[in-house]
Amino acid sequence: MRVLAVDDELPALEDLAYLLRADPRIAEVLTARDGAAALRLLDRGIADGRPIDAVFLDIRMRGLDGVVLGRLLAQFANPPRVVFVTAYEEHAVDAFEIKAEDYLLKPVRPERLAEAIRRVALSADVTVDAEESDTIPVELGGVTRFVSSADVVYVEAQGDYARLHTQSGTHLVRIPLNTLEERWAGAGFVRVHRSHLVAVKHIEELHIDSGRCTVRVGRTEIPVSRRHTRELRDLLVRRAKR
């Protein structure tokens, strides 16, 4: 999908654009800091035969505010999907009348944004390439790298962030562990603890002693919670038999 993020506050716009670019369902993120600039980008996309699929739109902006812009977009022959992203709750009725796909409150939580993108993708009938869905963009010193799930040994929760541990180093990303658990389930990752996901292929040893369970991946020992112990043990036994 091609999407447009609109917000007159630059830090909020940059944060939103970063989160949108982290989603594999989104191919391109354009940005605008006011309604007039947003309309120009939308018109250019139509003229170029590359229309914008969805607009993630702030409401209280200088000049043309988000509600007015949303009503204008609804009059397009093929209107883009609209997701409002605002610090104010009182415009939810306006969003309903405009038939917005979703209504997000700032500060935007990554998992909530992911749900909004899912709704937009379903509405737009967008599918995700399996090879693209298991990569995470990581920014360091102004450089963006793409870390594949195949290179990740385990993931550790750190608040609303997750630390990806690879064989060559670690990367901190602003994605909750629950989101990665769902996204990488098909890539061979299992939840072993409230704070850890582990790539099953990297598990070298399962150790149970006095009711305490751990797994070893390389030189690291990771705790396994009681509710995950039996399920993990059965999974490893089945893999060993195969």
Image (cartoon, rainbow, N blue to C red):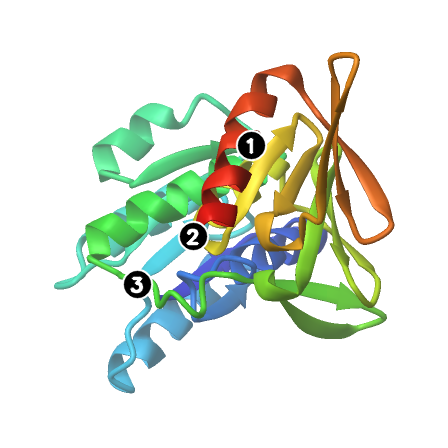
Q: Distance between the Cα atoms at labels 2 and 3?
A: 44 Å
Position of 84 relative to 168 (above/below): above
Q: Nearer the viewer, mark 1 or mark 2?
A: 2
Q: Amino acid at mark 1?
A: Leu
- In-front residue for pair 125/96: 125
Q: Quadrant of residue 51?
A: bottom left
Q: Determine which residue is flagged by label 2.
A: 242
Relative to 80, residue 12 above or below: above
Residue situated in front as seen by the camera: 149 or 200: 200
Amino acid at the residue labelled 3: Asp
Q: Earlier in the sequence, mark 3 or mark 1?
A: 3
Residues at marks 1 and 2, CA–CA distance in whole angstroms: 16 Å
Secondary structure at numbered mark 2? loop
Residue 231 x, y percent position in the rendering: 51, 27
Between label 3 and label 1, give the one nearer the viewer. Answer: 1
> Disc 3 and disc 1: Cα gap in Å?
41 Å
Please give the name of the residue rendered at 42% of the width and 45% of the height, measured from the top-left corner.
Answer: 66
The percent coordinates of residue 108 (x first, y second) are 58, 37
